Image (cartoon, rainbow, N blue to C red):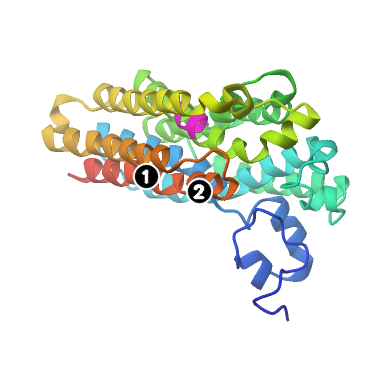
Amino acid sequence: MTARNETPVGQVADAVTGNWVDRRAPAWSRPYLRLSRADRPIGTWLLLLPCWWGVLLAAAATGPRLFDLWIIAGCGIGAVLMRGAGCTWNDITDRGIDGSVARTRSRPIPSGAVTVTQALIWMALQCLVALAILLTFNLPAILLGFAALIPVAIYPFAKRFTWWPQVFLGLAFNWGALLAWTAHTGSLGLAPFMLYLAGIAWTLFYDTIYAHQDVEDDALIGVKSTARLFGENSKPWLRGFLIASVVLMAVAIILALPPEAGILAMVLAIAGAWGFGWHLVWQLGQLDTGDNATCLRLFRSNRDAGLIAALFLALAALV
Protein backbone atom coordinates (compact mmCIF):
# COMPACT_ATOMS: atom_id res chain seq x y z
CA MET A 1 0.00 0.00 0.00
CA THR A 2 1.38 3.43 -0.98
CA ALA A 3 1.55 5.91 1.88
CA ARG A 4 -0.44 9.08 1.33
CA ASN A 5 2.63 11.30 1.60
CA GLU A 6 4.52 9.35 -1.08
CA THR A 7 4.24 9.79 -4.84
CA PRO A 8 2.44 6.76 -6.32
CA VAL A 9 4.52 4.69 -8.73
CA GLY A 10 4.00 5.91 -12.30
CA GLN A 11 2.11 9.08 -11.33
CA VAL A 12 2.03 11.60 -14.18
CA ALA A 13 3.51 15.02 -13.43
CA ASP A 14 0.33 17.09 -13.85
CA ALA A 15 -2.10 14.57 -12.36
CA VAL A 16 -4.53 15.71 -9.68
CA THR A 17 -3.00 14.98 -6.27
CA GLY A 18 -4.61 12.00 -4.59
CA ASN A 19 -6.68 11.08 -7.66
CA TRP A 20 -8.59 7.80 -7.69
CA VAL A 21 -6.41 6.23 -10.39
CA ASP A 22 -3.21 6.54 -8.36
CA ARG A 23 -4.87 5.58 -5.08
CA ARG A 24 -7.59 3.04 -5.83
CA ALA A 25 -7.43 1.63 -9.37
CA PRO A 26 -5.96 -1.88 -9.79
CA ALA A 27 -2.23 -1.66 -10.51
CA TRP A 28 -2.55 -3.35 -13.93
CA SER A 29 -5.09 -0.74 -15.11
CA ARG A 30 -3.26 2.39 -14.02
CA PRO A 31 -1.03 2.90 -17.10
CA TYR A 32 -4.09 2.66 -19.38
CA LEU A 33 -6.22 4.96 -17.21
CA ARG A 34 -3.35 7.45 -17.12
CA LEU A 35 -3.08 7.19 -20.90
CA SER A 36 -6.78 8.17 -21.04
CA ARG A 37 -6.17 11.02 -18.56
CA ALA A 38 -8.58 9.52 -16.04
CA ASP A 39 -6.27 10.96 -13.39
CA ARG A 40 -6.78 14.43 -14.94
CA PRO A 41 -10.57 14.73 -15.37
CA ILE A 42 -10.69 18.39 -16.45
CA GLY A 43 -10.33 17.45 -20.13
CA THR A 44 -13.40 15.23 -19.92
CA TRP A 45 -15.37 18.13 -18.47
CA LEU A 46 -14.18 20.47 -21.23
CA LEU A 47 -15.29 17.94 -23.86
CA LEU A 48 -18.60 17.23 -22.14
CA LEU A 49 -19.79 20.75 -21.33
CA PRO A 50 -20.36 21.88 -24.95
CA CYS A 51 -22.47 18.73 -25.40
CA TRP A 52 -24.61 19.74 -22.45
CA TRP A 53 -24.84 23.29 -23.77
CA GLY A 54 -26.10 21.94 -27.09
CA VAL A 55 -28.81 19.66 -25.75
CA LEU A 56 -29.94 22.13 -23.08
CA LEU A 57 -30.18 25.02 -25.54
CA ALA A 58 -32.15 22.77 -27.88
CA ALA A 59 -34.44 21.78 -25.01
CA ALA A 60 -34.96 25.45 -24.11
CA ALA A 61 -35.78 26.21 -27.76
CA THR A 62 -38.19 23.36 -28.52
CA GLY A 63 -39.16 21.98 -25.11
CA PRO A 64 -37.49 19.26 -23.01
CA ARG A 65 -38.06 15.61 -23.81
CA LEU A 66 -37.49 12.45 -21.80
CA PHE A 67 -34.85 11.30 -24.30
CA ASP A 68 -32.79 14.38 -23.36
CA LEU A 69 -31.86 12.62 -20.12
CA TRP A 70 -30.21 9.87 -22.17
CA ILE A 71 -28.49 12.42 -24.40
CA ILE A 72 -27.05 14.06 -21.28
CA ALA A 73 -25.97 10.72 -19.78
CA GLY A 74 -24.79 9.26 -23.09
CA CYS A 75 -22.70 12.33 -23.80
CA GLY A 76 -21.20 11.98 -20.32
CA ILE A 77 -20.11 8.40 -20.92
CA GLY A 78 -19.06 9.21 -24.46
CA ALA A 79 -16.96 12.16 -23.29
CA VAL A 80 -15.02 9.90 -20.93
CA LEU A 81 -14.43 7.36 -23.68
CA MET A 82 -13.66 9.72 -26.57
CA ARG A 83 -11.50 12.00 -24.47
CA GLY A 84 -9.63 8.86 -23.45
CA ALA A 85 -9.33 7.66 -27.04
CA GLY A 86 -8.28 11.12 -28.23
CA CYS A 87 -5.63 11.45 -25.53
CA THR A 88 -4.34 7.98 -26.38
CA TRP A 89 -4.06 8.99 -30.04
CA ASN A 90 -2.37 12.23 -29.02
CA ASP A 91 0.22 10.36 -26.94
CA ILE A 92 0.88 7.88 -29.75
CA THR A 93 1.57 10.66 -32.24
CA ASP A 94 3.54 12.74 -29.71
CA ARG A 95 5.68 9.95 -28.33
CA GLY A 96 8.79 11.50 -29.90
CA ILE A 97 8.03 14.89 -28.33
CA ASP A 98 6.69 14.02 -24.88
CA GLY A 99 9.99 12.62 -23.67
CA SER A 100 11.61 16.01 -24.24
CA VAL A 101 9.08 18.04 -22.24
CA ALA A 102 9.31 18.10 -18.45
CA ARG A 103 5.54 18.03 -17.91
CA THR A 104 4.92 15.10 -20.28
CA ARG A 105 7.91 12.78 -20.03
CA SER A 106 6.20 10.87 -17.20
CA ARG A 107 3.27 9.86 -19.45
CA PRO A 108 2.79 6.11 -19.99
CA ILE A 109 4.29 5.81 -23.48
CA PRO A 110 7.50 7.89 -23.06
CA SER A 111 8.01 6.39 -19.59
CA GLY A 112 7.73 2.86 -21.02
CA ALA A 113 4.69 1.82 -18.98
CA VAL A 114 2.65 1.16 -22.16
CA THR A 115 3.83 0.14 -25.64
CA VAL A 116 2.50 1.74 -28.80
CA THR A 117 0.74 -1.50 -29.75
CA GLN A 118 -0.97 -1.71 -26.37
CA ALA A 119 -1.99 1.94 -26.70
CA LEU A 120 -3.52 1.33 -30.15
CA ILE A 121 -5.57 -1.60 -28.81
CA TRP A 122 -6.72 0.49 -25.85
CA MET A 123 -7.74 3.33 -28.15
CA ALA A 124 -9.75 0.96 -30.36
CA LEU A 125 -11.61 -0.50 -27.37
CA GLN A 126 -12.64 2.94 -26.15
CA CYS A 127 -13.83 3.92 -29.63
CA LEU A 128 -15.92 0.78 -29.98
CA VAL A 129 -17.78 1.35 -26.71
CA ALA A 130 -18.33 5.02 -27.65
CA LEU A 131 -19.71 3.88 -31.01
CA ALA A 132 -22.29 1.71 -29.24
CA ILE A 133 -23.54 4.81 -27.42
CA LEU A 134 -23.52 6.96 -30.55
CA LEU A 135 -25.70 4.43 -32.38
CA THR A 136 -28.53 5.08 -29.91
CA PHE A 137 -28.92 8.62 -31.31
CA ASN A 138 -30.70 9.67 -34.52
CA LEU A 139 -29.03 9.29 -37.91
CA PRO A 140 -27.95 12.95 -38.35
CA ALA A 141 -26.26 12.86 -34.93
CA ILE A 142 -24.57 9.56 -35.80
CA LEU A 143 -23.17 11.05 -39.00
CA LEU A 144 -21.90 14.05 -37.05
CA GLY A 145 -20.25 11.65 -34.61
CA PHE A 146 -18.29 10.03 -37.43
CA ALA A 147 -17.37 13.45 -38.86
CA ALA A 148 -15.93 14.42 -35.46
CA LEU A 149 -13.10 11.95 -36.03
CA ILE A 150 -11.58 14.27 -38.64
CA PRO A 151 -10.57 17.14 -36.30
CA VAL A 152 -9.66 14.60 -33.60
CA ALA A 153 -7.24 12.88 -35.99
CA ILE A 154 -5.69 16.15 -37.20
CA TYR A 155 -5.25 17.93 -33.87
CA PRO A 156 -2.07 16.18 -32.60
CA PHE A 157 -0.23 17.21 -35.77
CA ALA A 158 -1.43 20.85 -35.74
CA LYS A 159 1.34 22.12 -33.48
CA ARG A 160 3.83 20.98 -36.10
CA PHE A 161 2.47 23.14 -38.93
CA THR A 162 0.57 26.09 -37.36
CA TRP A 163 0.94 28.58 -34.52
CA TRP A 164 -2.78 28.05 -33.87
CA PRO A 165 -3.13 24.39 -32.78
CA GLN A 166 -5.68 25.58 -30.20
CA VAL A 167 -8.09 26.25 -33.08
CA PHE A 168 -7.93 22.59 -34.07
CA LEU A 169 -8.43 21.57 -30.44
CA GLY A 170 -11.48 23.84 -30.35
CA LEU A 171 -12.88 22.28 -33.51
CA ALA A 172 -12.60 18.83 -31.92
CA PHE A 173 -13.56 19.60 -28.32
CA ASN A 174 -16.70 21.59 -29.10
CA TRP A 175 -18.16 19.29 -31.77
CA GLY A 176 -20.47 17.93 -29.11
CA ALA A 177 -22.47 21.16 -29.17
CA LEU A 178 -23.50 20.35 -32.75
CA LEU A 179 -24.00 16.65 -32.08
CA ALA A 180 -26.10 17.02 -28.93
CA TRP A 181 -28.28 19.74 -30.46
CA THR A 182 -28.87 17.45 -33.44
CA ALA A 183 -29.56 14.45 -31.20
CA HIS A 184 -32.46 16.48 -29.74
CA THR A 185 -33.76 18.28 -32.85
CA GLY A 186 -32.74 15.99 -35.72
CA SER A 187 -31.14 18.85 -37.70
CA LEU A 188 -28.61 21.67 -37.49
CA GLY A 189 -29.09 25.42 -37.78
CA LEU A 190 -27.40 28.75 -37.21
CA ALA A 191 -27.94 28.74 -33.43
CA PRO A 192 -25.90 25.59 -32.70
CA PHE A 193 -23.22 26.78 -35.12
CA MET A 194 -22.91 30.03 -33.14
CA LEU A 195 -22.71 27.98 -29.95
CA TYR A 196 -19.97 25.89 -31.57
CA LEU A 197 -18.00 29.04 -32.42
CA ALA A 198 -18.47 30.26 -28.83
CA GLY A 199 -16.93 27.02 -27.63
CA ILE A 200 -13.98 27.38 -30.00
CA ALA A 201 -13.29 30.90 -28.68
CA TRP A 202 -13.49 29.49 -25.14
CA THR A 203 -10.98 26.77 -26.04
CA LEU A 204 -8.59 29.39 -27.40
CA PHE A 205 -8.94 31.14 -24.03
CA TYR A 206 -8.33 28.20 -21.70
CA ASP A 207 -5.84 26.26 -23.79
CA THR A 208 -3.63 29.29 -24.34
CA ILE A 209 -3.46 29.57 -20.55
CA TYR A 210 -2.63 25.86 -20.37
CA ALA A 211 0.05 26.09 -23.07
CA HIS A 212 1.95 28.75 -21.13
CA GLN A 213 3.21 25.92 -18.90
CA ASP A 214 5.27 24.54 -21.77
CA VAL A 215 6.53 27.61 -23.63
CA GLU A 216 10.20 27.07 -22.76
CA ASP A 217 10.25 23.37 -23.67
CA ASP A 218 8.12 24.00 -26.77
CA ALA A 219 10.57 26.65 -27.97
CA LEU A 220 13.50 24.26 -27.56
CA ILE A 221 11.89 21.47 -29.59
CA GLY A 222 10.08 23.68 -32.11
CA VAL A 223 6.47 23.00 -31.08
CA LYS A 224 4.08 25.85 -31.93
CA SER A 225 1.25 27.23 -29.79
CA THR A 226 -0.76 30.40 -29.28
CA ALA A 227 1.06 30.86 -25.96
CA ARG A 228 4.37 31.11 -27.82
CA LEU A 229 2.82 33.22 -30.57
CA PHE A 230 1.28 35.79 -28.20
CA GLY A 231 4.03 35.75 -25.57
CA GLU A 232 3.80 38.78 -23.29
CA ASN A 233 0.78 40.02 -25.26
CA SER A 234 -1.34 37.01 -24.23
CA LYS A 235 -3.72 38.93 -21.96
CA PRO A 236 -5.13 41.23 -24.69
CA TRP A 237 -5.64 38.20 -26.94
CA LEU A 238 -7.32 36.28 -24.13
CA ARG A 239 -9.61 39.23 -23.48
CA GLY A 240 -10.64 39.12 -27.13
CA PHE A 241 -11.38 35.40 -26.97
CA LEU A 242 -13.39 35.98 -23.79
CA ILE A 243 -15.54 38.65 -25.41
CA ALA A 244 -16.02 36.58 -28.56
CA SER A 245 -17.10 33.53 -26.57
CA VAL A 246 -19.68 35.40 -24.52
CA VAL A 247 -21.08 37.36 -27.47
CA LEU A 248 -21.35 34.25 -29.66
CA MET A 249 -23.06 32.31 -26.88
CA ALA A 250 -25.56 35.14 -26.41
CA VAL A 251 -26.22 35.26 -30.16
CA ALA A 252 -26.80 31.49 -30.16
CA ILE A 253 -29.33 31.87 -27.35
CA ILE A 254 -31.17 34.74 -29.06
CA LEU A 255 -31.33 32.81 -32.34
CA ALA A 256 -32.46 29.59 -30.65
CA LEU A 257 -35.22 30.77 -28.34
CA PRO A 258 -38.52 31.55 -30.05
CA PRO A 259 -40.85 34.26 -28.66
CA GLU A 260 -43.13 31.61 -27.20
CA ALA A 261 -40.28 30.39 -24.97
CA GLY A 262 -40.98 33.43 -22.83
CA ILE A 263 -38.98 36.29 -21.39
CA LEU A 264 -37.97 34.35 -18.28
CA ALA A 265 -36.31 31.61 -20.33
CA MET A 266 -34.43 34.21 -22.35
CA VAL A 267 -33.28 36.08 -19.23
CA LEU A 268 -32.07 32.87 -17.57
CA ALA A 269 -30.19 31.69 -20.64
CA ILE A 270 -28.52 35.07 -21.18
CA ALA A 271 -27.65 35.15 -17.47
CA GLY A 272 -25.79 31.89 -18.04
CA ALA A 273 -23.67 33.48 -20.77
CA TRP A 274 -23.11 36.51 -18.52
CA GLY A 275 -22.03 34.38 -15.53
CA PHE A 276 -19.78 32.27 -17.76
CA GLY A 277 -18.14 35.46 -19.01
CA TRP A 278 -17.57 36.87 -15.54
CA HIS A 279 -15.80 33.66 -14.54
CA LEU A 280 -13.43 34.14 -17.48
CA VAL A 281 -12.91 37.77 -16.40
CA TRP A 282 -11.97 36.50 -12.93
CA GLN A 283 -9.49 34.04 -14.48
CA LEU A 284 -7.89 36.80 -16.52
CA GLY A 285 -7.48 38.91 -13.39
CA GLN A 286 -5.74 36.03 -11.60
CA LEU A 287 -3.49 35.04 -14.51
CA ASP A 288 0.29 35.13 -14.25
CA THR A 289 1.60 33.47 -17.41
CA GLY A 290 5.01 32.94 -15.80
CA ASP A 291 3.56 30.88 -12.93
CA ASN A 292 2.89 27.33 -14.08
CA ALA A 293 0.90 26.40 -10.98
CA THR A 294 -1.45 29.35 -11.50
CA CYS A 295 -1.87 28.52 -15.19
CA LEU A 296 -2.82 24.93 -14.34
CA ARG A 297 -5.21 26.02 -11.57
CA LEU A 298 -6.99 28.52 -13.82
CA PHE A 299 -7.16 26.03 -16.69
CA ARG A 300 -8.87 23.53 -14.41
CA SER A 301 -11.30 26.19 -13.16
CA ASN A 302 -12.92 26.29 -16.60
CA ARG A 303 -15.05 23.34 -15.54
CA ASP A 304 -16.87 25.74 -13.23
CA ALA A 305 -17.17 28.39 -15.96
CA GLY A 306 -18.79 25.89 -18.32
CA LEU A 307 -21.08 24.55 -15.60
CA ILE A 308 -22.43 28.06 -14.93
CA ALA A 309 -23.66 28.28 -18.54
CA ALA A 310 -25.04 24.72 -18.42
CA LEU A 311 -26.95 25.36 -15.20
CA PHE A 312 -28.71 28.47 -16.49
CA LEU A 313 -29.53 26.79 -19.82
CA ALA A 314 -31.08 23.92 -17.86
CA LEU A 315 -33.20 26.37 -15.89
CA ALA A 316 -34.25 28.08 -19.12
CA ALA A 317 -35.31 24.71 -20.53
CA LEU A 318 -37.40 23.89 -17.45
CA VAL A 319 -39.33 27.17 -16.98
In the picture, residue 13 is in which quadrant? bottom right
Position of the C terminus, as image quadrant, is: top left
Find residue 254 and report its image quarter. Answer: top left
Q: Quadrant of the N terminus?
A: bottom right
Q: Amino acid at mark 2?
A: Arg
Task: Name the side, left or right, on which 149 lies relative to 10.
Answer: left
Mark earlier in primary sequence (2, 1): 1
Residue position marked by numbered label 2 in the rendering: 300
Q: State how far apart marks 2 and 1 are (Cα).
A: 27 Å
Q: Which sits in the foreground, 43 or 255?
A: 43
Q: Residue 91's mark?
A: none
Amino acid type indicated by mark 1: Asp
Image point 17% across, 32% down: which residue?
Answer: 261
Look at the image and give the residue range highlighted in magenta: 201-205
Residue located at (60% from left, 54% from top): 40
Is any atom of residue 187 visible in this view? no
Residue occupied by mark 1: 68
Q: Is 103 on the left-hand or right-hand side of 46?
A: right
